[in-house]
Image: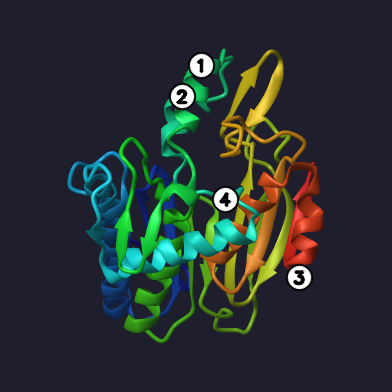
């Protein structure tokens, strides 16, 4: 933790992303306690929902092999949200795309997709195959839940709530570009948020937005993409085809009441491809598109 003028700042890594929590306070002791609690909450959520930990809820559910299981209240809330997002997206947003992740590498290199592997993986994808009656879940054998599409955004909101519970001071939570502001800064000025130019080879900000309160999230192909036969394909996979979406904007930034809502709307917009703008307009969303 460091002090940078009026701000106490904590920086750490979580969920494969650089994380930053900014708190505008002169009370170092209370601020440091709040920032420590924020980092602990981020770690808790990462451990609970990671696909890569044997002790995570995600792994425990996948080990049930089609057996009915009861999940906890927090997980139930995320599953309810995912089910709603699936409906709003017309089936494009799907929490069961985990099997497809083994077929793709989005590190910017040239790849040759294994068409047969993608076809086989699709037999284990589809929220409609999941039986979900809160709090009872049945995940068919071979299927995987992947909270990666909502986990980081959910963590941002939870960390912001932890901060607010600890101190009555404005804070900004930023996990890899997914953000939440608890309120304006002490002088009433909004937080200044930069939007990255998706076409730049390095991190160059092309636009700024003023955030007083709420969440902001960006989805696009600036950092995670694959090259297939000379085409740049972003990391957002269409669960109906098993392939990255084509025709979508390079970047979609959404402002919403929560980071979770903003991130989900941004992802669903990309999943609509060339219809991203129309989808967001139909949702009455506040957004920025970059091609």
Distance CA(mark 3)–CA(mark 2):
38 Å
Q: From the viewer's perspective, is the residue at label 4 or at label 2 nearer?
A: 2
Residue that sits furthest to the bottom in the current view: 168
Counting from the top left corner in percent of width and height, residue 120 is at 46, 24
The numbered mark at residue 120 is 2
Front residue of 228 and 15: 228
**Is residue 199 left or right of 16 when viewed as pictured?**
right
Q: How many marks?
A: 4
Instruction: Look at 59% across and 80% down and name the residue there.
Output: 184
Residue, disc 4: 93
- In the displayed structure, does residue 13 sit left or right of residue 206? left
Residue at which label 1 appears:
116
Q: Which residue corresponds to mark 3?
A: 284
Q: Where is residue 176 in the image (x, y as percent from the top left)?
A: 49, 50
Earlier in the chain: of badge 3 and badge 1, it is 1
Q: In which quarter of the image is residue 201?
A: top right
Residue drawn where x is 54% and y is 70% of the image: 258
Q: Do the residues labelled 1 and 2 touch (CB within 8 Å)?
A: yes
Q: Residue at x 64, y 17 (%)?
A: 228
Left or right for 89, reference 171: right
User: Which numbered disc, 3 or 4, marks the residue closer to the eye?
Assistant: 4
Q: Quadrant of the C terminus?
A: top right
Asked whether residue 242 appears in the rendered view, the answer is yes
- The kind of secondary structure element at disc 3 is loop
Q: Residue 262 falls in which quadrant of the image? A: bottom right
Give the percent coordinates (x, y) of residue 208.
Answer: 72, 59
First along the sequence among labels 1 and 4: 4
CA gap, disc 3 and disc 4: 19 Å
Q: Distance between the residues labelled 3 and 1?
A: 40 Å
The alpha-carbon separation of the residues under discs 1 and 2 comes to 6 Å
């Amino acid at each position: 933790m460091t002090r940078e003028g009026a701000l106490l700042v904590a920086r750490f890594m979580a969920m494969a992303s650089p994380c930053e929590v900014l708190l505008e306070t002169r009370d170092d002791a209370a601020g440091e306690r709040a920032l420590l609690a924020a980092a602990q909450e981020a770690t808790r959520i990462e451990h609970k929902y990671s696909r890569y930990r044997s002790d995570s809820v995600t792994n425990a559910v996948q080990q049930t092999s089609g057996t009915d299981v009861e999940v906890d209240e927090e997980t139930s809330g995320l599953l309810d949200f995912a089910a709603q997002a699936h409906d709003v997206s017309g089936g494009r947003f799907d929490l069961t795309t985990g099997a497809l992740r083994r077929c793709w590498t989005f590190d910017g290199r040239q790849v040759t997709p294994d068409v047969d592997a993608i076809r086989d993986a699709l037999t284990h994808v589809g929220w409609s195959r999941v039986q979900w009656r809160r709090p009872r879940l049945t995940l068919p054998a071979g299927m995987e839940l992947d909270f990666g599409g909502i986990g980081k955004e959910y963590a941002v909101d939870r960390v912001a709530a932890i901060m607010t519970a600890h101190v009555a001071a404005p804070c900004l939570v930023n996990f890899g570009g997914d953000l939440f502001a608890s309120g304006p800064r002490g002088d009433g000025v909004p937080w200044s948020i930069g939007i990255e130019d998706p076409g730049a080879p390095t991190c160059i900000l092309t636009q700024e937005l003023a955030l007083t309160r709420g969440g902001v999230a960006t989805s696009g192909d600036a950092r995670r993409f694959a090259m297939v036969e000379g085409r740049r394909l972003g990391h957002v996979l269409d669960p109906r085809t098993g392939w990255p979406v084509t025709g979508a904007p390079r970047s979609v930034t959404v402002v919403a009441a929560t980071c979770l809502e903003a991130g989900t709307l941004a992802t669903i917009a990309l999943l609509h491809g060339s219809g991203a703008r129309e989808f967001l307009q139909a949702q009455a969303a506040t957004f920025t598109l970059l091609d």
